Image: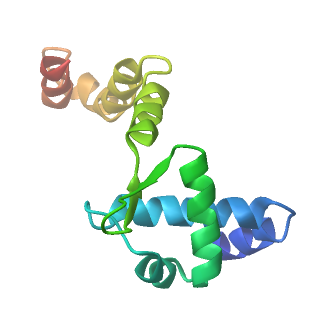
Amino acid sequence: MEDSIERKAAAAEPGVGAISRVFAVVRALGEGDPEGEKVTRLAERVGLSQPTTHRLLRGLVEEGMVEQCARSKRYRLSLDFFALAARAGQVGNLRDLARTVCHRPAAPFDEASQGGRSLLQRSFSSIW
């Protein structure tokens, strides 16, 4: 409930509501049919009017983040979107960050284990 209140308060700030709507469309495309979504269906899913959804999609197409199939008129996330997401995932060393987080739960068990390394820690170490 508190999260909902915070989102409503943030949406009241100028420009934040528009950003929230854009990301609602992006998320819906990401979770939708891999063949793409028609504007009407997408508008229903995100709870926006069809003209608003269409305007947001046009902006995303202009930015190269969404593409529209000329034949079916369906919209889907573009390869540029996925390339951007892949580059964002390379910032820092995600594997090292994940390893650190995964080892934290093992720390209390390390003291109790006779070999100094818990089963959980050995399992994660074998992955990386």
The quadrant of the rendering that contains the N terminus is bottom right
Q: Position of residue 65 (x, y in %)?
A: 50, 46
The quadrant of the rendering that contains the C terminus is top left
- Answer yes or no: is residue 4 visible: yes
Give the camera-side residue of 65 and 98: 65
Give the camera-side residue of 82 and 123: 82
**Is 99 placed above or below 31 here?**
above
Q: Position of residue 119 (x, y in %)?
A: 12, 28
Q: What residue appears at the point 27 percent right and 23 percent down from the top-left corner?
A: 111
Farthest residue, direction right:
14
Q: Quadrant of residue 95?
A: top left
Q: Position of residue 105 (x, y in %)?
A: 33, 35
- Answer yes or no: is residue 1 visible: no
Left or right of 57, for residue 33:
left
Give the camera-side residue of 59 and 9: 59
Q: Position of residue 120 (x, y in %)?
A: 18, 31
Left or right of 52, for residue 75:
left
> How many numbered discs?
0
Farthest residue, direction front:
71
**Is 115 placed above or below 22 here?**
above
Q: What residue appears at the point 45 percent right and 76 percent down from the top-left corner?
A: 42
Q: Quadrant of residue 20?
A: bottom right
Q: What residue appears at the point 86 percent right and 64 percent down from the top-left corner?
A: 13
Q: What residue appears at the point 47 percent right and 33 percent down from the top-left corner?
A: 84
**Is 68 placed above or below 124 here?**
below
Left or right of 29, for residue 13:
right
